[in-house]
Every structure is written in structure tokens, then in C-alpha cells.
């Protein structure tokens, strides 16, 4: 069993359970907060899957393999790529990786 110092545990506990009083700032009717929420909604709508390739595997000859999940953001004439690196394990299947890839877009 691991013992965590009381002060650290109190801080960790704030993230385990949702407390509307401390974590509900995004619900306030403040001009800056509403502007931030709107920009987050726009950003999420711009994030989409890149056409090809989406998931890139590192060489099988290397002892430690990683994956790259690639997402594309396009807005007007601006195109940016978001690349997320993830270590590859033996249990990874193509279906599981595809679901994980899509879950990043939904979140």
C-alpha cells in the first residue's frame, strides 16, 4: 500500500470528484469566459481526420516502437497538423488503435 502525504492527497482529491464550486468556472456569465468557450467549440469543429496516412507505425526493427496519430486543422488557407506520439504495445490491434484515434477527435 502506498502512503500519500495528506497535503498532496487533498490536492489529488480535487481532481477525482467534480466540485461545481471550484471547477465550474466555465459556466460563469463572464464575457471572457464565454469567448473562451466559443473559441473551444470552433476549434473542436475544425479538428478532423487527415485524409491519408492517419496512423503511422515506427519501424519494426527498433526495440521500442511508437505510433503517430496525425490530425489536421484547416481554417481558410491555413493548414496545421497535430501529431500525438504514443508507445506501441503488443496488445494493440488495428481496431483498438482506430477507436483510440477517433476518441481524440471527440474529446
Image (cartoon, rainbow, N blue to C red):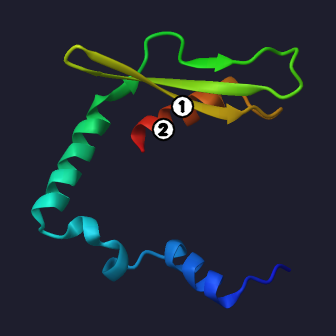
Q: Which mark is residue 104?
A: 2
The answer to whether residue 34 is above or below residue 98 is below
| Residue drawn at x 22%, y 53% as measured from the top left | 37
Displayed quadrant of residue 88: top right
Q: Which mark is residue 101?
A: 1
* Horizontal side of residue 16 vs 7, given as left or right: left
Labels 2 & 1 near each other (Cβ < 8 A): yes
Residue 50: percent from left, percent from top: 43, 17
Displayed quadrant of residue 107: top left
- Which one is in front, 100 or 28? 28
Badge 1, how many Cα within 10 Å: few under 14, some, many 20+?
Answer: some
| Residue drawn at x 19%, y 60% as measured from the top left | 33
- Assign the N terminus to one quadrant of the image: bottom right
- Which one is in front, 24 or 33? 33
The answer to whether residue 73 is above or below residue 59 is below
Residue 47: percent from left, percent from top: 35, 30
Residue 12: percent from left, percent from top: 59, 76
Displayed quadrant of residue 101: top right
Q: State how many labels appear.
A: 2
Amino acid at each position: 500500500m502506498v502512503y500519500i502525504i495528506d497535503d498532496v492527497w487533498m490536492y489529488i482529491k480535487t481532481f477525482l470528484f467534480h466540485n461545481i464550486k471550484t471547477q465550474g468556472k466555465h459556466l460563469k456569465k463572464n464575457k471572457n469566459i464565454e469567448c473562451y468557450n466559443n473559441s473551444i467549440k470552433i476549434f473542436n469543429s475544425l479538428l478532423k481526420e487527415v485524409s491519408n496516412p492517419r496512423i503511422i507505425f515506427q519501424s519494426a526493427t527498433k526495440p521500442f516502437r511508437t505510433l503517430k496519430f496525425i490530425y489536421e486543422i484547416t481554417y481558410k488557407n491555413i493548414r496545421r497538423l497535430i501529431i500525438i506520439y504514443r508507445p506501441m504495445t503488443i496488445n494493440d490491434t488495428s481496431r483498438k488503435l482506430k477507436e483510440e484515434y477517433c476518441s481524440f477527435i471527440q474529446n
